[in-house]
Amino acid sequence: MTVQEIVEQLKATFGEKVGELSETLDPFLTLKAEDLLEIAGFLKDTAGLEMDFLQDETAVDYPDESLIRMVYHLFSYQHRHGIVLKVELDRAAPKVPTLEGLWPVANWLEREVWDLFGVDFEGHSDLRRIMLPDDWEGHPLRKDYEDPTEYHGISHDRPSPIDGFTRVDEKLRQIAAETAAQLAAATGEGESSEESAS
């Protein structure tokens, strides 16, 4: 089934809850947060659609628009078709229902999104950090996130391990120049060139 056919089936069932398909390189539908669970469940459980795989669930931060976009990639192994759903959330208090009850893998993906973007997944069974320590402050993939200078008294500023090293190509040029100078001095070519020039 093509993406257009999937969208037509959604529109026939959900009407205005389904917006227009954005014809980008990876076409997507934008939904409201309150409609996500119902429409995602339909895509998973309806005969002919059966999107049994939540391929990916992530977020993108748009501070200039004051929103965070949730992005869901759904796929059906049986029918070899898929669709991308997007949900726009208020960046000040991003909140969306969990998809954990439909696809258990959402448990882990949503923990990662919460950890890094601060999105609250309503109904999630274990929403806690997965990438960073429990007492970490802030959500590092927000574009206005500022790195802390230390964590529990341990500074984040460290000298670069490559400081003081010379690039291989620069070192080879130095060796070639030194070898040429030594060769010229040994054969007297540099002096004879200077004499002939004068």
Image: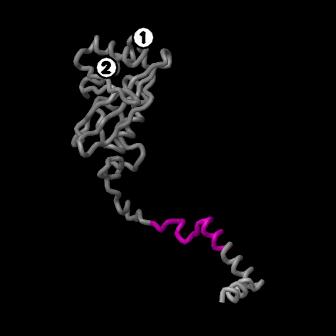
The one nearer the camera, 168 or 90, is 168
The one nearer the camera, 31 or 156, is 31
Q: Position of residue 62 (x, y in %)?
A: 28, 43
Q: Position of residue 56 (x, y in %)?
A: 42, 32
Which residue is depicted at the point 37% across and 14% down?
A: 5
Q: Is residue 135 above or below residue 76?
A: below
Q: Position of residue 160 (x, y in %)?
A: 49, 66
Q: Give the quadrant of the N terminus.
A: top left
First in residue order: circle 2 vs circle 1: 2
Q: Residues within 10 Å of mark 2 (few under 14, many from 20)?
A: some
Which residue is depicted at the point 64% across and 70% down?
A: 173
- Which amino acid type corresponds to the residue marked 1 in the rendered image? Gly
Q: Quadrant of residue 108?
A: top left
Q: Which mark is residue 39?
A: 2
- Which amino acid type corresponds to the residue marked 2 in the rendered image? Ile
Q: Quadrant of residue 81?
A: top left
Range drawn in magenta: 158-175
Magenta span contains residue 4: no
Which residue is depicted at the point 50% across and 15% down?
A: 78
Q: Quadrant of residue 14?
A: top left
Residue ID for mark 1: 48
